[in-house]
Amino acid sequence: MRIVRGLAFIAACILLSGCAEWFPESNTTLAPESRLPRWFQQPADVSRSDLSVEMLEYLDHGTFVLRNQRTGRQLATIRAQRLNSKPLTLPNSIRADGTVPNYSIMKVGGIVEIVERKRREAVFDISDDPDVRTKLLTMSGHTELLK
């Protein structure tokens, strides 16, 4: 009986590991004041305020969905490779309110974006700070992406 339960447990683990794509670690939205990730093109007839980006984050990648909020239409979906295995923080980066931002390095083709979470909420920004980019790519061992 123990062997049967053990085999059932192993089978369940194998089946669930194949379903990891269905269960994101987090689901966050791009801050309205942040620019769009460079792998998205803003449609000429749609203002930035009408666009939203949702990020579903998994262990090794993120799925980014661009939507027109006015029409509800999904405009694009991009799968980005996650270059760091866990959220990164920078030394001595405690803010005045006591929060410590964390970062993920995401890559689509040759385009690398730094995803920044400034607080513990379901909102992210795209960082344009060249010093943050350099430090994170160096810390994570991706100096070949410093351009």
Image: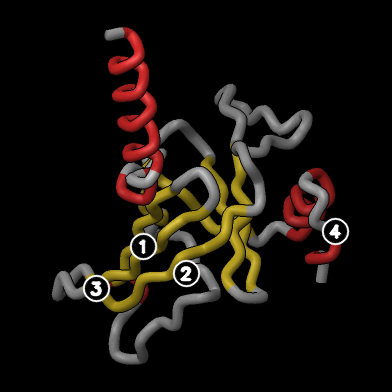
Image disc number at residue 36: 2
Residue at which label 4 appears: 143
Question: Going by the picture, which residue comes out furthest to the bottom?
Answer: 44
First in sequence: mark 4 or mark 3? 3
Local SS, label 4: helix
Whichever of labels 3 and 2 marks the residue nearer the N terminus, that label is 2
In the figure, is residue 122 to the left or right of 82?
Answer: left
Write the residue at 55% across / 58% down. 126
Residue 84 x/y as whole percent = 65, 46
Classify 48 as above or below 23: below
Name the amino acid, label 2. Leu
Dot 3 or dot 1: first in sequence order is 1
Mark 1, residue position:
53
The quadrant where residue 144 appears: bottom right
Tag shown at residue 103: none
Q: Nearer the viewer, residue 1 or 133?
A: 1
Looking at the image, residue 142 sits to the left or right of residue 14; the answer is right
